[in-house]
Image (tube, grey):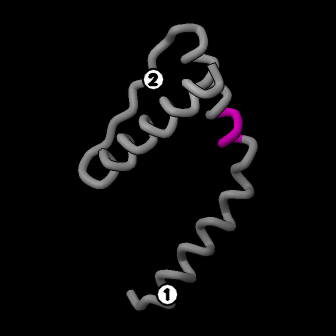
Amino acid sequence: MSFDASLAETLRTFQALTTLRAEIDRAGDLMLATLRRGGKLLICGNGGSAAEAAHLVAVAAQQVRQIG
């Protein structure tokens, strides 16, 4: 795939996220509520998605510490 085609596909993906905004917000609310009541989030991946999972955990942990 050419750079231009890859960029166009990435832009389409990001634009499509606006249609999922309510679901994304709800998922975030559920994760935060789970952590606030002492629950666990199990986040995993394989290969590249494992790196994404690790990054999500690091960002979420930082946010939870800041929010309380």
Sequence order check: which comes first, mark 2 or mark 1?
Answer: 1
The kind of residue tagged 2 is: Leu
Question: Is residue 14 located in the magenta-colored stretch of the structure?
Answer: no
The C terminus appears in which quarter of the rendering? top right
Residue beneath label 1, please? Answer: 5
Task: From the viewer's perspective, tell me whether residue 58 is left or right of residue 20.
Answer: left
* Circle 2: element type: loop
In the picture shown, does residue 59 fall above or below 38? below
Q: Which residues are magenta?
A: 23-27
Spot occupied by residue 22 in the image (x, y as percentages of width and height): 75, 42
Task: From the viewer's perspective, tell me whether residue 38 is left or right of residue 68.
Answer: left
Q: Residue at x 45, y 41 (%)?
A: 56
In the picture shown, does residue 32 fall above or below 51? above
The N terminus appears in which quarter of the rendering? bottom left
Name the mark on residue 48.
Answer: none
Spot occupied by residue 41 in the image (x, y as percentages of width and height): 45, 23
Residue beneath label 2, please? Answer: 41
Task: From the viewer's perspective, tell me whether residue 42 is left or right of residue 10.
Answer: left
Quadrant housing residue 23: top right
